[in-house]
């Protein structure tokens, strides 16, 4: 895993993850933020969610983390399960993609996108 971008935040992004997300956002051609959360389901009971969203949809109770002008948002319920999450990215041919390291997970699935807490 690469070093997480500082300062410490509720959702940490490594430099590699931030760079890749910014490249994906640029392809959309819009000023979007990244919403990260959890939903019920997956192999271990809960699955991570991640998608771009219009910043106008940020709700007053959302947690907002700023990375040099790029906003990462999460709803309060999801933050109960993912506070301290490190989001990393690897472009390796095998096992590449986004990686979630969640200090609150008591069990994770081999798929890397499902956990229980």
Image (tube, rainbow, N blue to C red):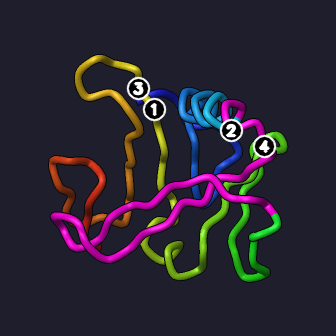
Mark 3 neighbour class, 10 Å CA radius: few under 14, some 14 to 19, many 20 or more: some
The mark tally for this picture is 4
Labels 3 and 2: the sequence-earlier one:
2
Q: Nearer the viewer, mark 3 or mark 4?
A: 4
Q: CA distance from mark 3 to mark 2?
A: 21 Å
Mark 1 neighbour class, 10 Å CA radius: few under 14, some 14 to 19, many 20 or more: many
Q: Is residue 79 left or right of residue 8?
A: left
Residue 24 on the magenta segment: no
Labels 3 and 4: the sequence-earlier one:
4
Q: Magenta span covers which residues?
A: 26-55
Q: Which mark is residue 30?
A: 4
Foreground residue, 113 or 8? 113
Q: Nearer the viewer, mark 2 or mark 1?
A: 2
Secondary structure of residue under mark 1 = strand
Secondary structure of residue under mark 4 = loop
The residue at 44%/61% (across/down) is 49
Q: CA distance from mark 1 to mark 3?
A: 4 Å
Q: Which residue is mark 3?
A: 90
Question: Residue 67: x and y, percent?
Answer: 75, 44
The residue at 72%/82% (across/down) is 61
Q: Which mark is residue 97?
A: none
Q: Which residue is mark 2?
A: 28
Q: Is residue 62 left or right of residue 109?
A: right
Mark 4 neighbour class, 10 Å CA radius: few under 14, some 14 to 19, many 20 or more: few
Do callouts 3 and 4 mark residues in contact (Cβ within 8 Å)?
A: no
Q: Which residue is mark 1?
A: 89
């Amino acid at each position: 895993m690469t070093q997480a971008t500082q300062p410490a935040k509720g959702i940490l992004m490594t430099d590699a993850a931030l760079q890749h997300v910014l490249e994906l956002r640029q392809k959309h051609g819009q000023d979007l933020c990244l919403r990260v959360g959890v939903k019920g389901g997956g192999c271990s009971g809960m699955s991570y969610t991640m998608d771009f969203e219009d910043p106008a949809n940020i709700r007053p109770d959302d947690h907002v983390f700023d990375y040099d002008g790029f906003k990462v948002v999460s709803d309060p319920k999801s933050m109960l399960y993912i506070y301290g999450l490190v989001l990393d990215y690897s472009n390796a041919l095998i096992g590449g993609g986004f990686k979630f390291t969640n200090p609150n997970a008591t069990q994770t699935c081999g798929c890397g996108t499902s956990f229980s807490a």
